[in-house]
Amino acid sequence: MVMLNRIFMFVYALANIFIGVAVLLVATKSISLDMIKDKVEPLTGTIVFIAGAAGFIILSLIALFVAMYSGGQKKIMVHGGAGGEVYMTVGAISKMVEKMLSWTDGLSNIKVTVDGSRSNIKVVIHADASPDCKVAEVTALVQEKVKEGLTASLGREINRVDVRIKDVKQPA
């Protein structure tokens, strides 16, 4: 899909360059619109103008779609060495944390967000607590286990692990 997106973006960029040059030539009166129409229309007909316009609209919509939906997840460098750098998306790190927390009694509806840069990684865990949960003990254990687990997995120090209890309710 990424290669197809790049091809569409390349074709779209070429079309924009062509249109930009044409507009510039018409604006500077180097050529006239009538001259373009008189030279091109007998060779191609009106249908080609319509097909070209439709193609350009389709390419524009594809470019808009690609811009909106590609490359959306931030990547964090997790390891750098002589062989190169290793990056993981924040989504992948979040899933690692959620799997680490599958053992947790007393917390449910766990959602994880990760933010970071070259120098630090911050994990925020949002969860609901059960009414009988010893929040201070459980959250301290969660912070310790997540920090240790991610440090071991990623080979990087985790700067912060915050736990935010959203609600107190019975797990479903």
Image (cartoon, rainbow, N blue to C red):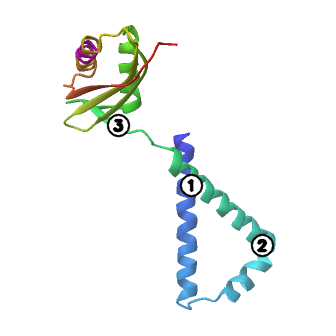
Q: Nearer the viewer, residue 53 or 157?
A: 157
Q: Is residue 47 above or below residue 103?
A: below
- What amino acid is labelled 3 in the image? Lys
Could one spot residue 73 in this view of the protein? yes
Horizontal side, residue 79 vs residue 129: left or right: left
Could one spot residue 45 in this view of the protein? no
Q: Where residue 172 sits: x, y (%)? A: 52, 13
Badge 2 element: helix
Residue ID for mark 2: 44
Residue ID for mark 3: 75
Badge 1 element: helix
- The image quadrant of residue 126 is top left
Q: Magenta region: which residues?
A: 139-145
Q: Where residue 70 sits: x, y (%)? A: 50, 44
- What amino acid is labelled 2 in the image? Thr
Q: Which quadrant of the figure contains the N terminus? A: top right
Q: Residue reaching furthest bottom? A: 29
At x 57% / y 50%, what residue is drawn? 65
Majority secondary structure of magenta residues: helix
Residue ID for mark 1: 63
